[in-house]
Image (tube, rainbow, N blue to C red):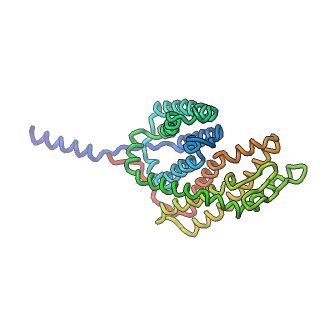
Amino acid sequence: MSSSEVSAGEQSLSQAGNCRVTVRPPTSGWIASVVLLLLIELCLLTAVAEFSRGRMSYLASPRVATFVLMTAVLTLVICGGELRQVGRAGNRARWFFLTTNVVIFALFFLWTDWLAGAGLHIGNALASTWAWPLGGLLVGATALLICFSFRGLVAWLRDHWHHVAAAAIISVTFVMYIHGIQRLWGVTSSSTAGIAQTVLQPFQQGDVRRYQIDPYNVLLGRLRVTQYCAEMESLVAFWVVGLTMLAAYWRSSRWIRMLAVLIVGTGLMYLINGLRLAAIVGAAELTTDAQLAVHLAHSRISGVLFLALSVLLLRVTRRWWRRSEAPTSTVAEA
């Protein structure tokens, strides 16, 4: 090989080493659509059945749902910006995984409904209870692959597994203290029930009955509100998400402003919680079905919506409590 050929080869390698590949992140519209799809699926799933006994009462419990949701949200809070840099899925792959997600969720939904009505003997069979979480993981994985490429997700998880682990540890700690958090209902029950009673009053012909049985039990219309359906954990989850976001971006955060957002946001969510109770009691009065109100109060739909509201409040006010930074480049070195 001549010297001219060697120099030409070195030049081509140099050009290849300096090449730049543009990474095309998923569009905000697709990300919002996938998030909405997952929220709808989770709300449908929590409304289909409530397991009170056996193995499924642990696997499909509200605490497990809270752990999964909190881990997902806190992971996005800690390293969601880096996730946006993962390359988008191809057009064919996107529609393939969207169809796959809908089909798998439909089967998973029917399976959960069957387990709920199959009785303890069949519904708690070892194969069913071990396979049920795998079905949930498949639904979540196919939803992610609608937006992101498989290789990009694997690379992101390899680089940020410790962030996911940190989010899981925070979520486990939160779930461990849920019972104590729910005891806050004893302090807030009177005022929250008062908000609900005030909202319902114009829509009722007579006075809306409100009777304080004890600090943790309030009879409001046909519904007895206890600490287990009062969503006190959702108010505290707002603080957990906010403080995690503050810790993740502590160098660029304005601490006093963030505390103001948390205090004002807590007041807003406190008011919304009163409106929620009014809506549940109103539904029971309209349909004359007290059991409907119980199912609505015990489902995780309220928890999902409150967590989504928490993220929305912190995202909307982010420019006020966080200093501006240079935008992250979407171009990766090849």
Q: Is residue 289 above or below residue 313?
A: above
Residue 112 image point, x, y percent: 59, 35
Residue 110 spot, x, y in % from top left: 60, 31
Task: Locate residue 44, reporting x and y percent.
Answer: 63, 38
**Quadrant holding the C terminus:** top left
Residue drawn at the location 70% of the way across and 43% of the way down: 295
Q: Is 281 above or below relative to 265?
A: above
Q: What residue is drawn where x is 61% and y is 55%?
A: 310
Left or right: where does residue 263 sit relative to residue 211? Answer: left
x 52%, y 37%: residue: 129
In the current view of this chain or complex, which residue is farthest to the bottom?
256
Which residue is found at the position 58% from the left and 34% from the top?
Answer: 123
> Residue 117, image x and y in percent?
64, 33
Extreme residue in the front direction: 121
User: Is 111 rendered above or below residue 176?
Assistant: above
Q: Report the front residue among 279 and 246.
A: 279
Q: Quadrant of the N terminus?
A: top left
> Going by the image, does 189 lie left or right of 83?
right
Asked whether residue 241 is in view, the answer is no
State whether residue 181 appears in this view: yes
Residue 314 left/right relative to 190: left
Q: Nearer the viewer, residue 70 or 291?
A: 291
